[in-house]
Structures are given as structure tokens and as C-alpha cells.
Image (cartoon, rainbow, N blue to C red):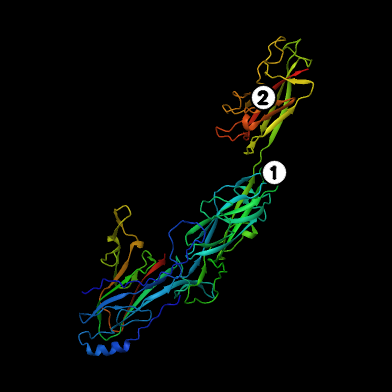
Amino acid sequence: MKQNHSGKPNMRIALLASAALLGLVSHNVWAVVTPSGTVISNIATMNYSVGGVAQTPIGSSPTGNTSGAGTATAFVVDNKVNLTVAESNSTVTSVSPGATNQVTTFTVTNTGNTAQGYTLVGANAIGAPTVFTVADDLDATVSAVFVDANGNSTYDEATDTLSAISSLAPGASVSVFVLATIPAAATNGQQAVVTLSATTKTAVTMAAVAEPGGANTASVDIVFADSANALTDPLAANTARDAIGIAQDAYRVVSSVLSVTKTGTVLCDPLNGITTPKNIPGAIVQYTVLVSNAAGTGASATLTTVTDTLAATVTHDPGLRVPTDAASCIAGTSSSGFKIVSSVVGRTLGGAAGVMTNIADADGATIVGQGLTVTFATALPAGGGYTAGELKSGESATITYNVIIN
Amino acid sequence: MRISNFLLTTSLLMGLSSLSMVAQAADNAISLTSRAQLEVEVVGKDGKKTLQRTPVEKAVPASEVIYTTTFQNRIDKPVGHIVINNPIPNNSEYQADSAFGKDCEILFSVDGGKSFAAVAQLKVKGDDGKERMALPGDYTHIRWIYLGQLMAGQSGEVGFRTAIK
């Protein structure tokens, strides 16, 4: 039996979608689907015999072919408009009260089969949607929306300046940054939810896209294929097949709660020594300044300075005397009159393991006249996972110095 | 999409040549028609949903397309040794178990139509270089071998389904 093993060559017309990225760097996340405009064609071939005599094979046609190679049964692949918008890093953006241009990051992905443009709208969420297990109870003011121009998924003020996606290839995705201002009156733990919506447009021209209501046409038609979402925000309650994608992200206020406590204790007096000493002239009083960052907020504080202007009735003890009796109840002889202790064991401290001199140098403590200043950037230097002057949530630092009653 | 319909207008010529070609007396013996269709759900007046086939409209990636090839005996003699070959169309993936054809043996090719075998015998080399069972996505061609003869005036139908990649 004669058999024709050769299939007819497929007629391929590759209409390359304009995948020019036009200033965007994007990422392909999956295999590219069949581009719109692709002609899919097919011809069946039949071998047969009549009266035992093999006949010339014939090809099929859409309407019935009786001889020869036939005609392809073909159609053109339409433009499937589909997109996803997603929050990028699966967590909130921690912010401080009053902070400006705070960034939440989203990812817009073209899941259709044609390069598309997208307009972008960022907005404070309406209602009180719960995002990352916390309900919205604060309104952030969205100041801008920018597209990631260099593909690093990080907002770069000088680089990321476009507010719409002009062309995104099928299968490609790009980061979008929403910038917002946090109210100055915001308190620790409050959360502001924002939404980003992306609306599909014609690539480059940014003309609107619409699904034709009527019958199929010979040219490439537009078919919306995006799904609905379950967001409760009225703005976000978009329906299936509307060419709009939307997602939410949140800003959570994380502010440190600092407390400063100063206490004074009489160490000794010249008559009683260290046994029930009294506040009499010549007595040494030890001041303790405790700076604490409350536990539970998760926010570090960066301490700057603590200052204390001593009353004229006392004199700073330049040697941080540790008296043992009435005779030793006098000013110390060294010039290291300050000590800092951290609640964190092993943290690097300024001076000699926290013992700081009175003079203006790099150890973090100085005294000028009656004015005492401790500078935390050097008293609590950077290192070991800390930035200079950083006091993490739940930690404290204690500064100690002595004065002698005149 | 409208089915491209480029009718060959050479039937008159063919008719003349058939008169002179005695050895191939059976030209025009068979009419071979291929249709591409979609299946859409239609809700009737009684609320019942039925599947209706329509010409391929609104075809996008993941759309399922049904290809049907009809062959008809147009002469007064039986036609035998019927073998129909059809490539899986470009940008399309064969859907498992979708090939149909009454009184036909159905074979597949995974090498561009060079060789054909039943599903259970089809093997391809995987990405790791090892041979594995062929998957529907590996199929390149389908072959229907019609068992028996197609009598005068009779017709048969074979086909398959694909998904647009």
C-alpha cells in the first residue's frame, strides 16, 4: 500500500508583537504563549485506492477538496488580554509617623499574548480591608506611582520616573512602586492599606482596549481573560474580564517608645562615709540616666545626645569615685568621669569599655563648665549588628556620673 | 476568526484532465473536508446547557479547537486503502485521548511524521537524555487507517482536539 508520510508544511505567519520594552526592563516569568495574529493552519492528507490502484493523494480544504494539495483550514489567534497585579514582597512596609515617599512594591505581569501598555493608579484603600492579618485603620496619602525602569525591583528616585507602563511583552512582568506619605499623628501599630490598579491599554499609543461586542472579525479580535478578585475595597472590586488588575499592600507604623529616667543616690558623705550618707557639703551623689526603648514595638531608636546642666551647687566628679569610707569620699583622681552600660551583654561601647573621659574627644562624653553631654553615636558605636547610636526595641542604656555637693 | 477559504478554481481543468487519464480514472473520487471548530456552551430556553460547535472565533491561548476531517466517496465504486495523515497544527498541542474515527486504527507520530505507532509504543528522549513514554504534547502527526472499504456514496469522519499554546 502506498503511503504518503509527508505532512503538508504548516503555514506559519509569525506576526511578531511589538515587544519593544521602551525604557522598561522586565522579567519573563513563563513560557511565552502563542502571540496574537499567529495563523494556525492545518491540512489533512488522504491516500486511497480505487479498484486496487493507488490514487494520487489529496489534501483537505475547508469546503471539500476533490483533487490536488488542498487548502489550509486556518484561523488567526486573537489578542488575549490578561494580567495580574500582585504585592511583591509578602510583607508590610514599616514606616515612621510623618514619613514621606514611603514605598510599597507591586508586580504587574502581562499574562496575555500581546504586548500591552498599562495605566497605573495608586490609592489609599477605601474601607478597612485586612492585609497581612491587620485591618486598615490609617489613611496614607499616595503621592506618586512609578515603574521600575532598570529592573532592580528597588525604587530609585532618579531612575524610576515613568508613571505608566508603555509596553510589556507577553509573559513579562515589571515592578511598580507606590509612594505615600504617612500622617504625622500616626501611632505605633497602625496600618494604612493602599491599592494599585493597572488598566490594560494598547502598547505605546496607550489607546483604550475594548472587547468587540459583535461577531468575530477577520482581523485580530480582543478577548478579555482576566479573573475577578476577592478584595473588599470598593475601588478594588473589579470584575472578571475587565482588563483591570488590582492588588493591595500596606504600610504599618512602627515607632519606638523611648523613656528617660534620671535618679540620684548619695554614695557617701565626709562624716558618715558610706553608711547612711546624707546630702551634706562634700557628699558624693551618683546620677544614673536610664534610656529605654520599650519592648514590643520592633522599632529601633537612634539616640543622639543626652545633656545635663549641673546646678551651681554641685561639681562634677572627674574621676567617678567609688568611695569606701569617709576618707575616700572625695573627688576621684582620674579624668574618666562617665560610664555607659548597655543592657546588651557584649555590645561595643565608647571609651574604655564604656568608661569615658571628661574631655572633648571621640569617646562620647564631654563636660564644658557645668554642661555635661553624652553623644550616643560614639558612646554606642556601630558594630555587631547595630548602627551608631541605635537602641533596639526592648533595650536600654545607662549612663552614670557623680557630683560632689559644694 | 473566519476560516480562511481560498477555493481552488481549477476544478474545470481537473475535470478535463480526468477524461484523458484512463489509468487514474478515479480522480474526484473523494471529497476531503477539514473544519476547525470551537465548542461553546449554549443555554437553551429550558435553561439546559448544551455544547454547540461553531467556526473558530475568539481563539486565544488555551482555547480548545476541534479538527474534523470528512471524507466522502463520490464515485460508484468502493474506495479502499484509505489512510489519512494530519499534522498537529502549529502552536497547538494535541489533547490526550481526543482522536476519534469510526472503523479506524489510530496511530501517532512523535518524529515529524516519519514513523507512526500506537500510543503505548511511543517513546521520546527526555531532557535528561533518557527515553520516556511520549506525552500528548510530543505528538507531531496523527494517522487514521480506515479498516475496510468506503462504499459508493458513503462518508467517514475522523478528528482530534488541540489546545492553542
Which of label 1 and label 2 is nearer to you? Answer: 2
Q: Are marks 1 and 2 on the same chain?
A: yes
Residue A268, percent from left and from top: 73, 14
- The residue at 64%/25% (across/down) is A340
Residue B148, percent from left and from top: 25, 76
Picture layout, residue A328 above or below residue B33? above
Picture layout, residue A136 above or below residue A166? above
Residue A242, percent from left and from top: 57, 65
- Name the residue nearer the viewer: B39 or A406: A406
Q: Is residue B36 visible?
A: no
**Among the 4 quarters of the image, the one containing residue A247:** bottom right
Q: Is residue B18 visible?
A: yes
**Among the 4 quarters of the image, the one containing residue B98:** bottom left
Count the marks: how many?
A: 2
Tell me the amino acid under the disc marked 1.
Answer: Thr
Question: Which quadrant is the C terminus of chain A positioned in?
Answer: top right
In the figure, is residue A179 to the left or right of A260? left
Picture layout, residue A342 above or below residue B66? above
Of helix, strand and loop, which one carries label 1?
loop
**Among the 4 quarters of the image, the one containing residue B20:** bottom left
In the figure, is residue A354 to the left or right of A218? right
In the figure, is residue A266 to the left or right of A205? right
- Name the residue nearer the viewer: B68 or A179: A179
Question: Which quadrant is the N terminus of chain A positioned in?
Answer: bottom left
Picture layout, residue A347 above or below residue A205? above
Q: Which subunit holds the residue at mark 2?
A: A
- The residue at 71%/15% (across/down) is A331
Please give the residue where the numbered disc 1 appears in the rendered image: A187
Q: Earlier in the sequence, mark 1 or mark 2?
A: 1
Please give the residue where the numbered disc 2 appears in the rendered image: A359
Tell me the amino acid under the disc marked 2.
Answer: Ile
Of helix, strand and loop, which one carries label 2?
loop
